[in-house]
Image (spheres, rainbow, N blue to C red):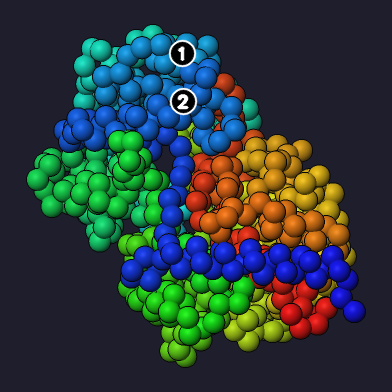
Amino acid sequence: MVEPEINEARANADLVIARAHDRFRREQFADGYWWAELESNATMDAEYILMTHVIGERNDAIWRGVAQDIRSYQRDDGSWALYEGAPGDLSTTIECYFALKLAGDEGPHLDRARDFAIARGGIGRARVFTRIWLAICGEWSWDDLPTMPLELMLLPARAPFSIYTFGSWARATVVPLLLLMNDRPVRPVPASARLSALKMPAPPIQPRDTVDRVFFAIDALLRRYHRLPWHPLRKHAREAAEQWVVDHQEADGSWGGIQPPTVYSLMALHALGYGSDHPVIRKGIDGMHDRWMIRRADGSKRIQACLSPVWDTALSLVALLESGVARTEPMVESAATWLRKEEVRVPGDWCVRVPEVEPSGWSFEFENDLYPDIDDTAVVLLGLHRAGALDDETRNRAVKWLLAMQSKSGGWAAFDKDNTSRLPAMIPFADFGEMIDPPSADVTGHVVETLAVLGFDRGHPAMIKALDYLYREQEPEGSWFGRWGVNHIYGTGAVLPALAAIGEPIDSVPVRRAIRWLVERQNHDGGFGEGCESYVEVAARGRGPSTPSQTAWALLAFIAADRADSPAARRAAEYLIDTQRAEGRWDEDAYTGCGFPGYGVGEQRGARIREGRELCAGFMLRYHMYRDCFPLLALGRYRAAVRRRGGVV
C-alpha cells in the first residue's frame, strides 16, 4: 500500500519532470548540444578592457558594452565581489575601477570604488595578479613584484618547479607570465585613468617559518640574477616559452579553453612583437568576440571565463534519460551524436605523466584538445551508455584512458595524474587560489559511479584503490570536500551515489555519518544550501540559503543511501517541486560552482595565506545550467525510488 503523501509527491514530480523535459526540448541547439552561460565575476570584463588596451585592440563600441556590464556588478558600497553575496573584494574592485576609468567613466560610482579601495589599503594589499596588470599598464613597479625566472621553461618535466609541477590552468597561465615578467612591457594609460590615489605602499610581509624564509631568500637571489647583464640560458628559454605558447593555442583561439591564459598569452606574444594582424593574435581576439562574449539586448557585453557545452550536454543527457526520456527521442539521439564527435583523439599535456596510453577523453569546452577533463569524460560515458550510444571501441579506449589517469592515492583529479606537489603554493608569486590539480572526492566519485555502471565491481584493483581513497577523504563530521562544486554538499552528493553504484554497504558507518550530516543541515523550507565561504570557513560547511542545485545534490545522496522515503528526502523533493517555474526551470542566483578554491583553511588545499593580503574564497562560478540539470536528475531518481517502494506508477 502506497502512502498518500508519497503518491501525491510522485504525481507532482511527474508534472515537474514533464515540464522540465519540454524546456530542454525547446532550448537544445541545432547541432545537438545544450549550453548555458558560465558566469564568474566582473574581473573577466575588466581584464578584457585592460588586455585590449595593452595590445592596441581598443574598440569603443565593445568597451561601452563591457563597461556597462562591469557597472551592473558594482555594489552599493562601491566595491565589486567575487560572487553573489560575497563581501567586497579589494583586487576585484581595483581592476574594475581601473577598467572603467580607462573606458572613460567618471562620476560618484567611481568615487565610491576609489574610497573602498583606499580604505582597504590600496594597490599594496592587492593580489600579485592584480599588481601584474597594473605593472603592465605603468601603474605599479615591476620591481615590487615577486620574481619568476624564465629559465623554468628549461627544467625537465619531472623536476621541482618545472611548468608541469603546476596544474593545467596554472601552467597555461604561468608560461606567458614568465615572458611578461622577463620582458616587463609597459603600456601607459592616459592621465585620466591613472591610479595615483591608490598607490599606497605594500605592507611588509614577514616570513612566518623556515619554509617562508627559504622561499623569500630564493626570491631575493632571483631578483639579483635578473639584474645581471649576462643570462646564458635566457634566449633559449625565451624561444622555448614562445614556442610553447604558440603550440598551445586551441582551434577557437583560446589557450586552455579559459580566460586567464588567453589574455596573458595575447599580451606576451604582443610584447614579443606579434602585431594585431598576426594570425595567432587575430585568432585569439576573434575567438573571444565570437564565442566568449555574451551580447545582451540592453547593449551590455559580458566576457565569460570559460565555455561549458560538453559538461552542460553530458549532465543534461544523463538527467533526461534518468528522468524517463526514451533513448529514441530525437533530442537524446542528437545529443549523443554530438558528444561522440567531441571525443579528444590527440595527445595533450597529460601525456607528460601518462605517455603510453591511446588519447581519449572529453574536454569541457567546444575546443580544448590539449586538456581533456576526467570529470567530463566520466559523465559523458555515463550519458552515452544510458543512451545506448556507446560503442565498444570508444568505451574501451576511454576507459583505458580513465584508468591510466588514476593517481597513486587512488583518486582522480580533473586534468592531470599525480599533480600534487605543494611547492607551487610556497612561492611568493602564488597568493590566489589553487595552483595544482590534486585528486578530489567529487571527481573520483563520478568516475567510480560511471565505471560501476559500465560493469566494474568492488574487487577491481582500481576500484579498491578508489574506495580506499574516498573513505580516507571523508571529513570528521561526515561530509566530503567538493573541489569543483560548492562544496561539501556537492562532494557528498557525488560520493554516496558512487558508493551505492559500486555495491558498497549503504548501512555502513561512513554512509550513516554522511546522512546524519546532511539531515542536520537541511533548511526549514526543506532545501539545502551552502555558501562559497565554506572554502575558507569550517562553520559555513553545508550552511546557506536553499538553492535548487544544492538541494538536488543532497537528494541524490539520500536516494543513493536508500533514504528516498525518509522525511528529509521527501522535504527536499517537495522543495524542488514547489520551486519550479511554470516554464519548466528553476531560479538560482547563487554561485554553486568552483573554478578553484581559495585559501584560509588547511593550507594543503590552496595557497599559503600571506599576512597583509586579502582572504580569498577562490574563483567561483555560476553555472546557469546547474539549476535545471541537477533538479531534473534528482527528481528522476527520486521518482524511480518511489516506484520501487510503492508499486507501478
Q: Quadrant of residue 72?
A: top left
- The residue depicted at 71 percent of the width and 41 percent of the height is 544
Q: Where is the N terminus found, in terms of image quarters?
A: bottom right
- The residue depicted at 82 percent of the width and 68 percent of the height is 6
Percent across and percent down for residue 508 are 86, 69
Q: Is residue 637 left or right of residue 74?
A: right
Residue, disc 2: 74
Judging depth in this view, the residue of 639 and 372 nearest the camera is 639
Q: Amino acid at mark 2?
A: Gln
Q: Would you place residue 146 above or below residue 343 in this image?
A: above
- The residue depicted at 54 percent of the width and 36 percent of the height is 83
Residue 646 in view in this figure:
yes
Q: Amino acid at mark 1?
A: Arg
Q: Would you place residue 451 above or below residue 351 in this image?
A: below
Judging depth in this view, the residue of 153 and 564 nearest the camera is 564
SS at mark 2? loop
**How packed is label 2: few (under 14 Cα within 10 Å), some, or many (20 or more)?**
many
Q: Is residue 394 left or right of residue 87?
A: left
Q: Would you place residue 142 above or below residue 354 in this image?
A: above
Q: Quadrant of residue 572?
A: bottom right
Q: Would you place residue 624 above or below residue 335 in this image?
A: above
Q: Find out whether the residues at labels 1 and 2 contact each other: C-beta distance under 8 Å.
A: yes
Give whichever of discs 1 and 2 has the lower sequence position.
2
Residue 239 in view in this figure:
no
Q: Which mark is residue 571?
A: none
SS at mark 1? helix
Residue, disc 1: 112
Percent across and percent down for residue 11 are 73, 69
Q: Where is the C terminus found, in terms of image quarters?
A: bottom right
- The residue depicted at 42 percent of the width and 59 percent of the height is 35
Percent across and percent down for residue 594 are 55, 48
Percent across and percent down for residue 534 are 68, 41
